[in-house]
Image (cartoon, rainbow, N blue to C red):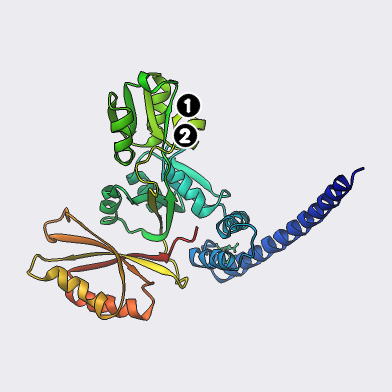
Amino acid sequence: MSQDQDNLGKIRQRIDALDGQIMELISQRADCAQEVARIKRDEDPEAEFYRPDREAQVLRRIHSENPGPLDAEEMARLFREIMSACLALEQQLEVAYLGPEGTFTQAAALKHFGHSVQTRAMTAIEEVFREVESGSAHYGVVPIENSTEGVVTHTLDRFMQSPLVICGEVELRIHHQLLSHATDLGDIQKVYSHQQSLAQCREWLDSRLSQAERLSLASNAEAAKQAAKDPQSAAIASAAAAQLYGLNILASNIEDSPDNTTRFLVIGPRASGPSGQDKTSLLISAHNRPGSLHGLLSPFAAHDVSLTRIESRPSHCVNWEYVFFIDIEGHCQDAKVAAALSELRAQADLVRVLGSYPKAVL
Ligand SMILES: C=C(O[C@@H]1C=C(C(=O)O)C=C[C@H]1O)C(=O)O
């Protein structure tokens, strides 16, 4: 046996021994999680085991203390899966998402909760809300904004009527693939996709597929299904959808902006506690008076609270002329945020906290 082979054998023995220790430690961790569950259940038989604030803190600590050589993000992803498996011992979470299977929203749900939850595909954003409102699913995941195309107005509008709260956010880098049974771009007559994805690939389509008609459908996965039926068509969708619907990737990463990112929200029946690094989303309205927007924003400036986003929408209601969706830094239980909100309540016709939730970690 050569010296190298001898060394290889020894290193493999060491890896086997380490795997044994890792397994033992993960099992001890799972025992602790079950113990936490017993305590929570004793305090309250209806207790919710999932704690987004605690999970965010665990992941942040792993991220910041990671010694390498693995990338911090990679290490946090491994722990995301360990926590997901531990939580599944306590409670099988059901997560509704904007389907069908293979959408970016499903990828976002799995990124946020890990792979030990049960994901359930819904056909519309409205249905995701309804599924969680009725209690058929514990949580829901819906898209809210894209770095290239802006806000998903349908999701914002739905918050105006829903009692649900936002308990998390997920950011996902979006890579679009052109999927088809065809092998030549010249054969493509139609391109199907969700309207946002068509917009995110506009320049690529103008230069490489200008002959093809663009047709928008309810989701990218739906587009992949359509493209699978007609070899003269293509879909813009994810690599996961290519596998799921048996299509070739005819061109990859065709999005116009290299940092094309979509943000998703996790919606649920219960508010999240403070994690130390949080955001709060608000729905605010005021009558149309001169200076009313200024009045709505000044409490944030006065209490040193940063605004990360502001979006205005038609109110769909005669009483209010403006509705603003505002994201701020901090949790509604933080002193600065609480002070800004109480000042705001004195000026606005409506202030609803849509949720305070941990900033995305992964
Ligand atoms: C163990 C707990 O419950 C759940 C499981 C967690 C874990 O495995 O670390 C973290 C938060 C909760 O989702 C807890 O609240 O600490």
As helix, strand or loop, the secondary structure at mark 2 comes to helix
Depth check: give the residue in front, 315 or 312: 312
Depth check: give the residue in front, 165 or 179: 179
Q: Earlier in the sequence, mark 2 or mark 1?
A: 2
Task: Tell me the quarter of the picture where residue 290 sits.
Answer: bottom left
Is 295 positioned to the left or the right of 67 in the image? left
Q: Is residue 145 above or below residue 252?
A: below
Mark 1 surroundings: few (<14), some (14-19) or many (≥20) residues within 10 A: many
Residue 247, which numbered label? Answer: 1
Give me the residue at 13% from left, 70% from top: 292
Quadrant position of the N terminus in the picture: top right
Residue lying farthest right?
1
Marks 2,1: beta carbons within 8 A = yes
- Residue 343 horizontal/vertical position (percent): 23, 79
Q: Mark 2 sits on what residue? A: 241
Residue 257, which numbered label? Answer: none
Give me the residue at 28% from left, 53% from top: 156
Q: Note whether ligand 1 is within 8 Å of mark 2.
A: no
- Residue 303 horizontal/vertical position (percent): 29, 80
Is 58 positioned to the left or the right of 186 in the image? right
Task: Tell me the quarter of the picture where residue 79 sits.
Answer: bottom right
Q: Callout 1, which amino acid?
A: Leu
> Image quadrant of ligand 1?
bottom right
